[in-house]
Image (tube, rainbow, N blue to C red):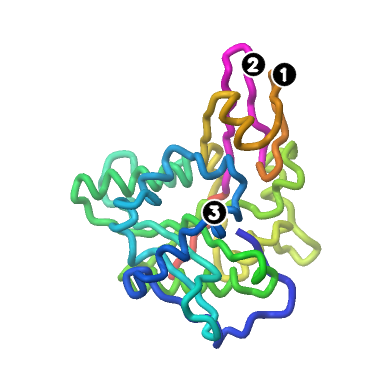
Amino acid sequence: MTAETRQSFPPDRLAVSTLAERPELRASVFSAEFDSIWPEFARHDPAASLYYGTQALDRYLDFALAAVDRDAPDRAIARACSVPFAFRDGTAGRNELPPGGWDAVIRWADADWRAGRRATVVSALEIAVLPPYRGRGISQLMLEAMIANVWARGFGDLYVPLRPSDKDREPRTPFAEYAARTRADGLPHDSWLRVHVRAGGRIVRIAPYSMVIPGTLAEWREWTGIDFASSGDIVVPGALSPVNVSVEQDYAVYVEPNLWVHHRI
């Protein structure tokens, strides 16, 4: 997710719908163009298929938003995905936000569906804007649209396992140190976190292993183009923290921390 700073996109030109309302946009929203926004390795999180898989997504079409430019209404330029789950409802292990963050809420939502359990809150999963439209405030508009959709679906809480958009510039900085950094005006240093705080979000806690992506060295070489010839912590472009590599065991694991943010609607 990214925050925007360039000339603003006219809000009245942005039309946001759920995929339940505009199912014909599904192919555009989940196209290779959108996939290319994220580092290749990020598209291999094992938990992701429980939401983004073709059949799984059918359950969440009311929580997947597509935005179009009214001047070109048949092509999505931004998407915002969220997932409902049961929280603090008496379900065992659901009294605190999970340290497993993004992965955990996707798995919780899947378990809730299988158990026929009623969701009580919603978690954001991503907001993505196509490159030609970045830097114009669309991410903030999509956050506002997501919050409005959560309210429209009868929920009063949106939780966000937030991926700080600028953290990949300094992957070796401890996450807690980075997340606590503020500007002179007291707002967060990170631009995307700043957008959420300005929108009323409250920082709750760190999710230290929000996204865990394991793979063989051959897979990681394919995903990154890096040789991984030695063991240790290796910096990979787009990663918020180094990837742990074991040449001896032929694997590498990426553990991404996120920051839980709460929007009370």
* Label 2 vs 3, first from the N-terminus: 3
The amino acid pointed to by label 2 is: Val
Q: Residue furthest right?
A: 184
Find residue 247 and name its label: 2
Residue at numbered disc 3: 35
Dot in front, 2 or 3: 3
The number of callouts visible is 3
* Label 2 vs 1, first from the N-terminus: 1
Residue at numbered disc 1: 230
Where is residue 119? Give x, y as percent.
28, 56
Q: CA distance from mark 2 to mark 1?
A: 6 Å
When asked about the image quadrant of residue 50, the answer is top left
The amino acid pointed to by label 3 is: Asp
Q: Residue furthest bottom?
A: 12
Where is residue 244? Give x, y as percent.
63, 26
Residue under the point 21% across and 51% down: 117
* Label 1 vs 3, first from the N-terminus: 3
Look at the image and tell me in which quarter the C terminus lies: bottom left
Q: Secondary structure at mark 2?
A: loop
Q: Main secondary structure of the magenta part?
A: strand
Where is residue 240? Give x, y as percent.
66, 43
* Bounds of the magenta segment: 240-258
Q: Residue furthest left?
A: 116
Tell me whether the residue at label 2 lies in contact with that at label 1, contact meaning CB atoms closer than 8 angstroms.
yes
Look at the image and tell me in which quarter the N terminus lies: bottom right
When asked about the image quadrant of residue 238, the answer is top right
Dot in front, 1 or 3: 3
Residue under the point 68% across and 35% down: 225
Q: CA distance from mark 1 to mark 3?
A: 29 Å
